[in-house]
Image (spheres, helix red, strand yellow):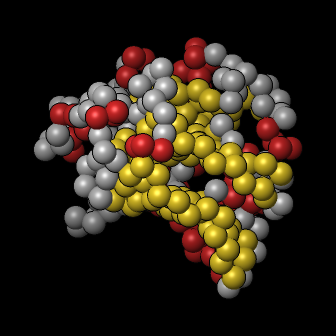
C-alpha cells in the first residue's frame, strides 16, 4: 500500500464518489485505546487515541464474495502496557451505500467486559458478514510468501524511487493497487486521479527523513507472510516530532512534505508489499 496519507488515502476515490456503484465503509469511535484493524487477515489501519476520537475507512478493496471477517485487536501501547486495566468502549459501524440507499451491516458498542484477554495481553473482537460484490480472491491466489530480507530490499527500492522523484517508477510500483481499487470502486479513472495527486507531492516534496537505517524499518506481516506492512520508527530529534508526548513515539508513516507559503500536503509512505507472480509490488 503506497498511498496518500491515511486521511487522504482515498482522495481519488472521493473525487469520483458520485460514480461509485457501491461502497462499504467502517466507522470507529473510541477513547483511550490503541487498536489494529484487519479485514480478512489483511491490515487495514491503526487507531490510536487518548481523547474521544473517530476514524473511518473504505473496505471494498479488502472484500471477497462470501464470508468476510473484520478483526479488531486492542493492544498495549507505550502509554498503557496493560489494556486489561482500561475501561474502554468502541463504537463500530459498518455500512453499505448503494446509490442513495444505505444499509447497516454492523452497528455495535463493544466494552471491555465483552472480550477475553489473549496470551499477548490484547483483546480481540471479530465479526463476520456476507458480501456479494467485489471479489479480491483472484488477486489473493497469486500472492506468494516472502522473507523479511526481501521486504527490506524492496523497501529500499521504494525509498530510492521517491528520492529520485521517478514518477513512472513510482506509479509502476502501484500497478496492482490501482487495478484493484479501480475494480473495487468501479472508478475507471482512478489511475489518472491518483497520478495527479502523486505528481504534485512527489515532484514538489521531500522525504521527512532520507537516511534510514535497517533497524528503523518496522515490518508487520499478515496473511501467512504474503503481505508486509511497512512503517518507519520516528526520529525524535526532528522538529516535526518536538512536542509529541514520549509515549506517542510509535512506528508511523514516512512523510513527504510540500510547503508553499505555509500551506502544503503530505504523501504518506506507509505501504504494504506483496509478491505477485514472483514480482514485488505495493499492495492494498
Asked where in the image residue 149 lies, by quadrant, the reply is top right
Q: Single out the residue that lies furthest toward the front.
A: 113
Left or right, residue 234 beside residue 129: left
Asked where in the image residue 184 lies, by quadrant, the reply is bottom right
**Horizontal and vertical percent for residue 194?**
60, 60
Q: Is residue 69 visible?
A: yes
Q: Is residue 171 shown above or below 214?
A: below
Left or right, residue 48 beside residue 246: right
Left or right, residue 225 beside residue 109: right
**Horizontal and vertical percent for residue 278?**
79, 25
Asked where in the image residue 20 lies, by quadrant, the reply is bottom right
**Horizontal and vertical percent for residue 272?**
59, 37
Left or right, residue 154 beside residue 68: left
Q: Is residue 30 shown above or below 207?
A: below
Q: In terms of depth relative to the viewer, which is nearer, 195 or 134? A: 134
Residue at point 29%, 58% (across, down): 52
Residue at point 64%, 39% (across, down): 42
Q: Is residue 234 visible?
A: no
Residue at point 83%, 30% (across, down): 277
Q: In terms of depth relative to the viewer, which is nearer, 71 or 55? A: 71
Q: Single out the residue that lies furthest toward the left.
A: 243
Residue at point 53%, 27% (across, down): 220
Amino acid at each position: 500500500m503506497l498511498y496518500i496519507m491515511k486521511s487522504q488515502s482515498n482522495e481519488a476515490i472521493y473525487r469520483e464518489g458520485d460514480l461509485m456503484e457501491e461502497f462499504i465503509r467502517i466507522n470507529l469511535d473510541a477513547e483511550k485505546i490503541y487498536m489494529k484493524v484487519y479485514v480478512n487477515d489483511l491490515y487495514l489501519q491503526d487507531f490510536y487515541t487518548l481523547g474521544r476520537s473517530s476514524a473511518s475507512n473504505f473496505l471494498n478493496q479488502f472484500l471477497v464474495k462470501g464470508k468476510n471477517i473484520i478483526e479488531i485487536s486492542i493492544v498495549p501501547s507505550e502509554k498503557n502496557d496493560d489494556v486489561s486495566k482500561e475501561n474502554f468502549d468502541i463504537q463500530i459501524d459498518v455500512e453499505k451505500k448503494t446509490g442513495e440507499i444505505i444499509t447497516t451491516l454492523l452497528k455495535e458498542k463493544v466494552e471491555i467486559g465483552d472480550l477475553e484477554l489473549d496470551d499477548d495481553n490484547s483483546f480481540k473482537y471479530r465479526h463476520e458478514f456476507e458480501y456479494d460484490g467485489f471479489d479480491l480472491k483472484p488477486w489473493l491466489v497469486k500472492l506468494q510468501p516472502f522473507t523479511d530480507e526481501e521486504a527490506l530490499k524492496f523497501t529500499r527500492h521504494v525509498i530510492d524511487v521517491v528520492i529520485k522523484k521517478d514518477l513512472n517508477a513510482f506509479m509502476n510500483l502501484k500497478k496492482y493497487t490501482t487495478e484493484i481499487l479501480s475494480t473495487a470502486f468501479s472508478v475507471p479513472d482512478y489511475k489518472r486521479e491518483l497520478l495527479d495527486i502523486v505528481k504534485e507531492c512527489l515532484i514538489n516534496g521531500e522525504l521527512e527523513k532520507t537516511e534510514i537505517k535497517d533497524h528503523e524499518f518496522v515490518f508487520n506481516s499478515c496473511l501467512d507472510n504474503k503481505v508486509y506492512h511497512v512503517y518507519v520508527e520516528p526520529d525524535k530529534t526532528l522538529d516535526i516530532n518536538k512536542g509529541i508526548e514520549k509515549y506517542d513515539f510509535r512506528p508511523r508513516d514516512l512523510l513527504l512534505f510540500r510547503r508553499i507559503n505555509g500551506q502544503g500536503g503530505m504523501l504518506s509512505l506507509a505501504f504494504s508489499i506483496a509478491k505477485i507472480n514472483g514480482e514485488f509490488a505495493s499492495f492494498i
